[in-house]
Amino acid sequence: MRGSRKESRTRARPSVAALALGAAVALASTSSRADESQPIGASLHVGSGTSTSDEPVMRRQTVAELEGGIIALPSAPISKANPSANSAFFGSGTKLFGKGDATILAGLHFLYRWAPQWAFGAGFLFGPSPTAETIPSAPGASRSHSRNYLTVSAQGRFIPLRSRYFEGWVGLALGGVVIADHYETDTPDIYQQYPSVVGSRESNVRTEGFAIGAQAGVSWLVARSWVIGFAGRVDRWFLPSSPQCDVIYDCATITGSVTAFELGLTVGYRIPL
């Protein structure tokens, strides 16, 4: 009897071990399926060991964002002589932004997100279709003036609002701004006949300065790696107090400190690392 009991216990032990091994395999399989079902940003949490359904675990990732929108300088008209020049997008600048300028904005941002709540990177914004005006010139001549904007900045973002498909962020931008005043003679015959009066057919006056800004935005995950959102930004530009001029006294039209407002729609692509 004792021998048979020992033999039965010996036979039972492999069965218990097999059951434990089977349970472990089942649990691992379930965990791996759950990880595969989560969106791209929810596999590795950085900075905390817990996660919930409202705040997903995040991978380190890089983000490339395209932006398109508007830029407005309410206190910076195209020129003192013509404060209501027609902008490419808004018509007369006096309709919406006082005597300032407003035009189309485009840009590109590259960001590295090493933690769920922090991202940093760089970007640039420019105006591809600047506001233009006709300016006085020699008798019978026609000249035009337009103004381009370019900002290049380092950017940091803090993302306090996070869920599986929605995020809200705030940030700072620090960098430089370049403003180009472009002058052009639109009547080639006059230019050829009176070059000393009309001056060069084209001339550019460049102004460089320092820019600092605050920004905020929201974004939605619409596909595994694609994100769309809205971004707003307020910049303060610090420019030389005296305008630069060329040899025929075509001068820069912005000096001192200027406030710029930007609002845009963003489309981003995330690459997990």
Image (tube, rainbow, N blue to C red):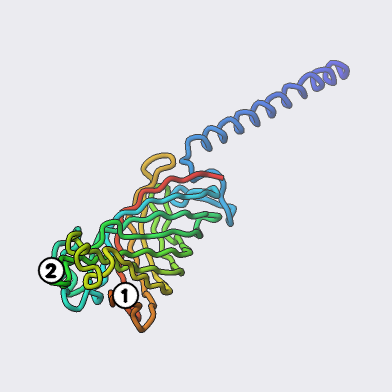
Q: Is residue 47 left or right of residue 241?
A: right
Residue 132 shows in the view: no
Task: Give the residue drawn at x 25%, y 72%.
Answer: 196
Q: Quadrant of residue 235?
A: bottom left
> CA–CA distance between discs 1 and 2?
18 Å
- Residue flagged by tag 1: what amino acid is it? Thr
**The N terminus sits in image quarter:** top right
Could one spot residue 210 in this view of the protein? yes
Check if mark 1's residue and mark 2's residue have beta carbons within 8 Å: no
Q: Which residue is mark 1?
A: 259
x 33%, y 67%: residue: 204
Q: Which residue is mark 2?
A: 95
Q: Looking at the image, which residue sits at the far front?
A: 193
Amino acid tagged 2: Lys
Residue neighbourhood size for the residue with mark 2, other residues' Cα within 10 Å, grouped as few (<14), some (14–19), many (≥20): few
Query: Looking at the image, is 27 positioned above or below residue 14?
Result: below
